[in-house]
Amino acid sequence: MDTFLLTLRERNTLLYWFGMLCLIGFVGCITLSLTTSRQVLGVNAFVKPAKFFIAIWIFCWTMGWYTGLLTQKPQVNLYSWILVIAMVIELVIITGQAAQGKLSHFNVSSTLDSLLFTTMGVAITIATLWTAYIGLLFFGPHHTVTDAAYLWGIRLGILFFVIFAFEGGLMGARLSHTVGAADGSLGLPGLNWSKQYGDLRIAHFWGMHALQILPLLGYYVTHRTSVLISLSAVYFLLATLLFVQALRGKPLIAYL
C-alpha cells in the first residue's frame, strides 16, 4: 500500500492530495450524519455528500494513476487543475445544500437553487469532456504503457466512463433519477437505489466504474487483448441492459 501511495503521489501530486482532502471530507460527512437528524428524501442529509466525497476520491486517484502514464505533462497538469476545480464546485454545492436540508440535484425550486444545479452540470460536463480528451491521448504514442491488454483496459474504461457519465444528462433533463415514480421511494440499504421502480443511477454507477474495473482486468486477469475486449463488451452490454431496465421502470432487485 505504501508503494502504491508513493507511486501515485509521484505520478500526479495534485490529484493525490486532493484525493486525501476528499477522504477527510468523507469522514466529516459521516460524522455529521451521526450527529444530525436532518433528512433529504427520507435519508440523512449528509449521506449524499459522503458518497460524493468517496466517489470523487476514487475518481481522482484513478485519473491520477492513469495520467502518470502519459508523457504530455502540460496537458496532464491542465487537466488535473480543471478536474480539481470542477470537483470542488460539485462538493461545495452538494454539501452546502445538504447542510440546509435541500436537494442539490434536480432542485429548481428557486432561482438560486436552479443556478446551483446548472453550475454543477456545467462543471461536470467540462470535467467529463476533458477526461474524454485524456482517453484520446492513450490512443496515440504519448504514453508509457507496454502491455496491450492493460492499455485497452484504460482506453475502454475511460470511454465507458464518459458514455455513462453523460447519462447523468438524461437524469438532469428529467429532473429525476427514478422512472415510474417521484424520487424518494424505498431503496436498497446504503445505496438507496429504488426497490420499487426504475433507477437510472444503477447504470450510471456501473458504467462509470468501468474506469477502474476494465484496466484491473487487463492488468491482473488477462494479458490477451482479445479476451479483454470481449470482457469489456460483456461489461458494456450489462450496463446497457441496466439502463434499459431502468427506462422501463423496473427495479434492479425488488425483494431485498
Image: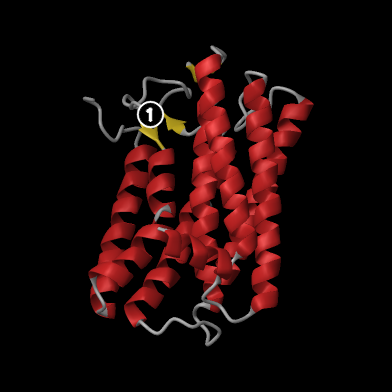
Task: Look at the picture and state if 221 lies above or below 91.
Answer: below
Q: Could one spot residue 171 in this view of the protein?
A: no
Task: State the residue in front, 164 or 248.
Answer: 164
Place residue 81 in its image quadrant.
bottom right
Q: Residue furthest right?
A: 111
Q: Measuring 67% from the left and 53% from the top, which residue is drawn there?
A: 84
Q: Measuring 25% from the left and 79% from the top, which residue is drawn there?
A: 224
Q: How is the image coloured?
A: secondary structure
Place residue 193 in its image quadrant.
top left
Q: Measuring 29% from the left and 35% from the top, which residue is drawn there?
A: 252
| Quarter placement of the C terminus | top left
Task: Look at the picture and state if 99 lies above or below 104.
Answer: above
| Quarter placement of the N terminus | bottom left
Quick check: 13 left or right of 247?
right
Task: Look at the picture and state if 98 lies above or below 20.
Answer: above
Label 1 sits on residue: 190
Estimate the x, y position of residue 130 in percent, counting from the top left.
Answer: 63, 64
